[in-house]
Image (spheres, grey):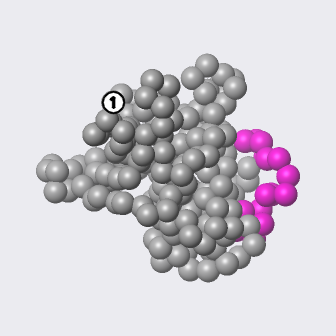
Amino acid sequence: MVASRNTLQDGNLGVLRVNYQIVQPADALKENDAAIVRPQNAIQYSLCGTGTGCTIPGTATQKRFTLLKRQGLELALRTFQNDSAVDNVSVFLRPAAADAPWEGYALVFDRTALNRSEPGLLARPLHETMPGTKKTVTPTELTAAEVKRIDTLTRSSLFRYRYEIIGGRDALLQLQPTKS
């Protein structure tokens, strides 16, 4: 896992600032359909498996993807609980591939939206929100109730993503909501 503040590490260009997120629904017809988000204090995490291109060795499954979402949700909740200045957390689920032209999947959480949709969530201890946080969990150990809870808490935060470099030293994070 790699963590950074509003930056994208690029092998050729070094570190780029990510000052804007553009959220465009899949059914958007015009540029006006997109929402521009400018997080003031954001943290980005990149999850990476040990395989080629950050994959996780073995067969990709829906439960394994749910476990990635669980890990991303836990990172976001811990970040918001431990750093009150952070207003936006992005977690790139690099082991999960997306269809072109998208680079992959990301969970993007906004503190205000999360507080509005799940009042009190950030005030509760993590183990009350997500059972099993005190031990290592495998995909086969996820219960149906845990899968449902993870899906409920991440549904509105799951996006396909891609970057566009603008102005030489800045990057624009383009996001498109997913249906699942």
Residue furthest out toward the top: 52
In this rendering, does residue 58 appear at all? no
Residue at position x 29%, y 58% in the image: 36
Instruction: Tell me which secondary structure the magenta stretch mostly adopts.
Output: loop
Q: Is residue 146 left or right of residue 135?
A: left
Instruction: State yes or no: residue 106 in magenta.
Output: no
Asked which quadrant contains residue 95, the reply is top right
| Callout 1 secondary element | loop
Labels in figure, total? 1
In this rendering, does residue 169 appear at all? yes
Q: Could you say which is closer to the camera, residue 178 or residue 6?
A: 6
Q: Quadrant of the N terminus?
A: top right
Q: Is residue 171 left or right of residue 80?
A: left
Q: Could you say which is closer to the camera, residue 59 or residue 117?
A: 117
Q: Amino acid at mark 1?
A: Pro
Residue at position x 36%, y 28% in the image: 100
Asked which quadrant contains residue 165, the reply is top left
The residue beneath circle 1 is 101
The x, y position of residue 53, in whole percent, is 57, 23
Residue at position x 77%, y 42% in the image: 138
The x, y position of residue 99, in whole percent, is 39, 30
- Magenta range is 127-141
Residue 88 position (above or below residue 55): below
The x, y position of residue 107, in whole percent, is 51, 51
The x, y position of residue 98, in whole percent, is 44, 33
Q: Could you say which is closer to the camera, residue 115 or residue 153?
A: 115
Residue 42 position (above or below residue 128): above
Circle 1 crowding by C-alpha within 10 Å: few under 14, some 14–19, many from 20 = few
Residue at position x 58%, y 41% in the image: 46
